[in-house]
Amino acid sequence: MPLSRSAALKAVIADCNEGPGTRLVVAGLVKGPDNTGSPLYWAVFVDPPGKHIAPSAETPALATRLNWIGGFVPVRAPAQLFCDFGHASNLPRLPVFEHSPDF
């Protein structure tokens, strides 16, 4: 049986180390490489608690502010999920930035 949306969200929160209090932004099925028995993946984007900055040697004030954090979970092989994060100029800030004066 293919992985459910809620199971994909739980996998991203647990395996991508996002922790308690992480909120779902959006999740949907997308096509990807068919190396797990199916080309379908759950694309799960989340808003974890805390400041959203990329790991960096820079001070937090100079670090890249992330506006997407998530994981891609194969519907037939959830253990092979891929966690990622980044900044895209065409995406809005994650909600936490609206309430954080220093970011």
Image: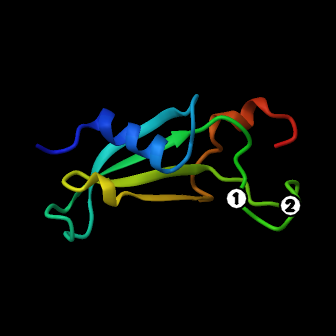
Name the image quarter holding the N terminus: top left
Q: Position of residue 56 (x, y in %)?
A: 77, 65
| Quadrant, the C terminus | top right
* Label 2 packing within 10 angstroms: few (<14), some (14-19), many (20+): few
* Amino acid tagged 1: Ala
Task: Please name whichever residue, 25 or 4, is drawn nearer the observer in this view of the structure.
Answer: 4
- Give x and y (percent) for residue 88: 59, 59
1 vs 2, front mark: 1
Q: Could you tell me which residue is drawn at 74 percent across and 60 percent down?
A: 64
Query: In this image, 3 relative to 6: left or right?
Result: left
Instruction: Name the residue at 86% across, 61% down.
Output: 62
**Residue placed farthest to the left in the image?**
1
Label 1: which secondary element: loop
| Residue 13 vs residue 100, the one in the foreground | 13
Residue 39 place in picture, x, y as percent: 19, 62
The residue under label 1 is 54
Which quadrant holds residue 90? bottom right
Image location (x, y in percent) of residue 72: 37, 55
Say which residue appears at 39% left-offset and 38% top-offset: 9
Image mark for residue 69: none
- The amino acid type, in three-letter code, at marker 2 is Leu
Q: CA distance from mark 1 to mark 2?
A: 10 Å
Residue hosting label 2: 62
Q: Is residue 5 left or right of residue 94?
A: left
Graded by Cα atoms within 10 Å as few (under 14), some (14 to 19) or many (20 or more), the crowding at tag 1 reads: some
Apparent side of residue 82 relative to residue 59 in the rendered image (left or right):
left
User: Considering only vertical position in the picture, is 69 above or below 48?
Assistant: below
Marks 1 and 2, the one that precedes in the sequence? 1
